[in-house]
């Protein structure tokens, strides 16, 4: 077998994710196919490149040597393709903006605003439950930018060189349960109110399973935990089979209740990542407008925002104008810093004023 660039991408994906399962998902392959391809690559190179253990895959000394040569080649080819496509788009008189995102109700409004406000730009969208996968795609040039969430307590692995701008420093995560659940009568739910319930969580979402387990353990609870995608979780929650975590912007349904958790024990940070500040500038304002539009349209979240603003607790980036910070110790590899641009920390009401929206009514 002759070694090709696609084989080098396989090695980089395994090293970056630390798992054959996660690497296969990122590459769009079945895990058995990836395992077979890795064996063929190792046979072609004459030695073992990765050691598989209970904690995942780690590179052998030979694997580290191969990766040190493979990464620049993969990055250079990605840059060649990205630059060529951009030049072709400019020659054709337009540009295709390649966006990636984890799930959010703000995405349709974001796309609509980009089509309207950014001349001659046609956005395309790639969804993924893994924020880390999307960030790697931006770094490699396969996406122009990505809107992702970082679960509190599980920092994202932000590739060196990416510019990251904070949309919301801490978005609380709510709970979704059947509308006839006894706890649904409360304006906010205590974890102890759900002591007898089973939870369903999508464990493929980076950090989400671990975050919920930590919160439940801290509350002295050890409920049954089920793996499942959130479409299934909402369907089962409506019948009372499970309860599940949900974004506060989730759309209400007659058979479901969406409630804040007392004390807001689970939070996420919402980020927009790109390779340059100029790219962030061309899409950040549209994303902020779209997010606050859906936030104010979600009854439970709007009520939470109003209560938090009244108590002086709600702080969210949203006004024009940014500052530059270094947060490599928080989200990047140890000893490596990368620039992070964060929105000025203003209140939710001030953010609404800055973007031309009315204050939430009291």
Image (cartoon, helix red, strand yellow):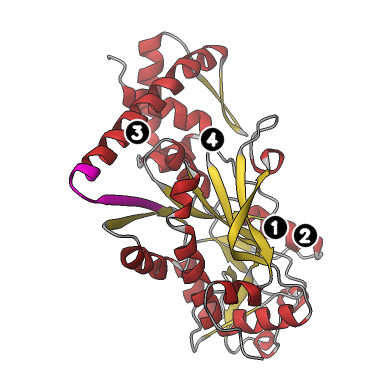
User: Real-space Cα distance between discs 2 and 1?
Assistant: 6 Å
User: Real-space Cα distance between discs 3 and 4?
Assistant: 32 Å
* Residue that appears at 47% across and 39% down: 136
Which residue is the site of mark 4?
Answer: 161
* Residue that appears at 78% across and 76% down: 312
- Residue 164 in percent (x, y) is at 56, 48
Which residue is the site of mark 3?
Answer: 33
Q: Is residue 221 left or right of residue 285?
A: right
Q: Is residue 334 above or below residue 301?
A: above
Determine whether label 2 and label 3 are within 8 Å by CB.
Answer: no
Q: Is residue 115 above or below residue 51?
A: below
Asked if residue 154 shows in the view, the reply is: yes
Asked if residue 232 shows in the view, the reply is: no
User: Real-space Cα distance between discs 4 and 1?
Assistant: 32 Å
* Residue that appears at 49% across and 76% down: 293
Determine whether label 2 and label 1 are within 8 Å by CB.
Answer: yes
* First reached walking from the N terminus: tag 4 or tag 1: 4
Few, some or many C-alpha atoms within 10 Å of disc 4 (few <14, some 14-19, many ≥20)? Answer: some
Please report the bounds of the magenta region as a residue range: 89-99
Few, some or many C-alpha atoms within 10 Å of disc 2 (few <14, some 14-19, many ≥20)? Answer: few
């Amino acid at each position: 077998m002759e070694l090709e660039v696609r084989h080098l991408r396989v090695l980089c994906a395994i090293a970056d994710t630390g798992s054959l399962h996660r690497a296969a998902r990122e590459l769009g392959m079945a895990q058995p196919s990836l395992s077979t391809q890795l064996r063929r690559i190792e046979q072609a190179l004459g030695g073992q490149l990765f050691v598989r253990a209970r904690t995942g895959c780690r590179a052998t000394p030979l694997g580290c040597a191969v990766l040190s040569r493979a990464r620049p080649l993969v990055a250079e080819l990605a840059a060649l393709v990205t630059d060529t496509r951009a030049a072709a788009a400019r020659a054709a008189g337009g540009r295709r903006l390649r966006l990636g995102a984890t799930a959010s109700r703000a995405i349709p409004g974001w796309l609509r605003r980009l089509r309207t406000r950014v001349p001659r730009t046609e956005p395309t969208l790639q969804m993924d439950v893994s924020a880390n996968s999307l960030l790697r795609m931006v770094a490699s040039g396969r996406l122009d930018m990505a809107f992702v969430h970082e679960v509190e307590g599980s920092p994202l692995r932000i590739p060196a060189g990416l510019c990251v701008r904070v949309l919301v420093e801490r978005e609380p995560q709510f709970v979704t349960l059947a509308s006839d659940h006894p706890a649904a009568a409360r304006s906010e739910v205590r974890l102890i109110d759900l002591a007898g319930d089973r939870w369903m969580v999508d464990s493929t979402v980076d950090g989400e399973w671990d975050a919920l387990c930590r919160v439940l353990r801290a509350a002295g609870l050890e409920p049954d935990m089920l793996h499942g995608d959130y479409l299934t979780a909402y369907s089962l929650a409506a019948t009372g089979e499970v309860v599940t975590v949900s974004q506060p912007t989730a759309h209400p349904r007659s058979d479901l209740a969406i409630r804040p958790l007392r004390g807001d024990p689970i939070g996420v940070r919402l980020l927009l990542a790109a390779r340059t500040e100029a790219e962030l500038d061309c899409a950040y304002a549209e994303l902020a407008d779209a997010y606050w539009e859906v936030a104010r349209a979600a009854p439970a979240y709007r009520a939470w925002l109003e209560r938090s603003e009244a108590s002086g607790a709600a702080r969210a980036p949203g006004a024009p104008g940014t500052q530059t910070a270094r947060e490599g110790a928080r989200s990047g590899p140890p000893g490596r810093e990368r620039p992070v641009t964060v929105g000025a920390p203003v209140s939710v009401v001030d953010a609404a004023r800055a973007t031309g929206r009315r204050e939430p009514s009291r």
